[in-house]
Amino acid sequence: MARANSIGQSEINWDKLDKTKFYVVGAGLFTGVTVALYPVSVVKTRLQVASKDVAERNAFSVIKGILRTDGIPGLYRGFGTVITGAIPARIIFLTALETTKVAAFKTVEPFQFSEPTEAAIANGMAGMIASLFSQAVFVPIDVVSQKLMVQGYSGHAKYNGGLDVARKVFKSDGIRGFYRGFGLSVMTYSPSSAVWWASYGSSQRFIWSLLGHGTDQEEAAPSLSKIMLVQATGGIIAGATASCITTPLDTIKTRLQVMGHENRNTARQVVKGLIVDDGWKGLYRGLGPRFFSMSAWGTSMILAYEYLNVAAAYMQTIEDGPRGEELELDNNPQAPVLQQPEY
């Protein structure tokens, strides 16, 4: 079967995926990435909520302080809550992402955009819509896990685990307490997801075009190492772009979500407080760890996700199609382009 020259034509259709493998194996892959990168989220959160009189003003001093007082377990505060809620949230996100992406590509196709532009728009639309769907689960996880991350730090209350946090939040604010900062979460994660996927999709296609793939001049399939390098580079570019644009909103959201019942500042008051303490750069607290987290998470996730996507489609092709289709999918030089969550 002839190989399509267009990178956009190499997208793997949602209907062709082995859904069982996609979800089961995916849960394992993304849990492993979460375990590796979770401490970075703890450091980022502590930097964002620290008061001006706290001595730990950079990531390394925060890590040293955590290890000194709590050891390695301190870097995983709130991890149980995140890992419990993240699996259903990611199922929602990935399902919405895949189904929306197919429709998004069909929507922009009549406009005759260039490959990178088409990829940026379609992937951006899919990422934003998927993030909107998943926020219903992610925000309560954020509220509980972030309170655990900063408990006892910079004047914040202490808790006896995630259930204790949930009980106290419900007692003081009811169900809406779990959705504190929901609007800012949507404003943070949806644009962040859109920017990430748009940057990833367009940068990957741009890199492939620079390397001569997807044109009539180059027909040989690239090596697996080259495919992984292009995907990893796209993930780093996407992480850098998204973190720089959305960190101020993330800082405000985090501060709102970890405030105790007695402190009910508005987003405007939080912004004023940050500017008084550190000037405008206060809005970019935790930018370093967030950039590292989004880039490292994005790179790790996208490699795992692209593998998972191809593997799931591969298994479905074995069941439904001839060997020729299986080989075409296996050797396709343009890997399918598909958030990244914050964790």
Image (spheres, helix red, strand yellow):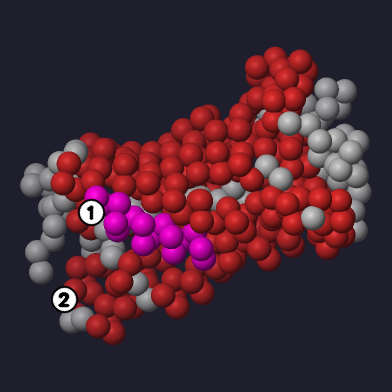
In the displayed structure, 90 sits above or below 340; it is below
> Does any portion of residue 27 appear in the rendered image?
yes
For the point 38% across and 60% down, which residue is it? 98
Q: Where residue 231 is drawn, which disc sits there?
A: none
Within 10 Å of disc 1 (Cα), the crowding (few <14, some 14-19, many 20+) is few
Is 102 one of the magenta-colored residues?
A: yes
Residue 327, horizontal then vertical, whole percent: 21, 72
Label 1 close to label 2 by CB (< 8 Å): no
Residue 20, horizontal then vertical, whole percent: 45, 78
Residue hosting label 2: 324
Q: Nearer the viewer, mark 1 or mark 2?
A: 1
Asked which quadrant contains residue 321, the reply is bottom left
In the displayed structure, 251 sits above or below 147; it is above
Horizontal side of 24 relative to 59 (left or right) equals left
Residue hosting label 1: 106
Kind of residue sitting beneath label 2: Gly
Kind of residue sitting beneath label 1: Lys
Horizontal side of 286 relative to 2 (left or right) equals right
The magenta span reads 91-107
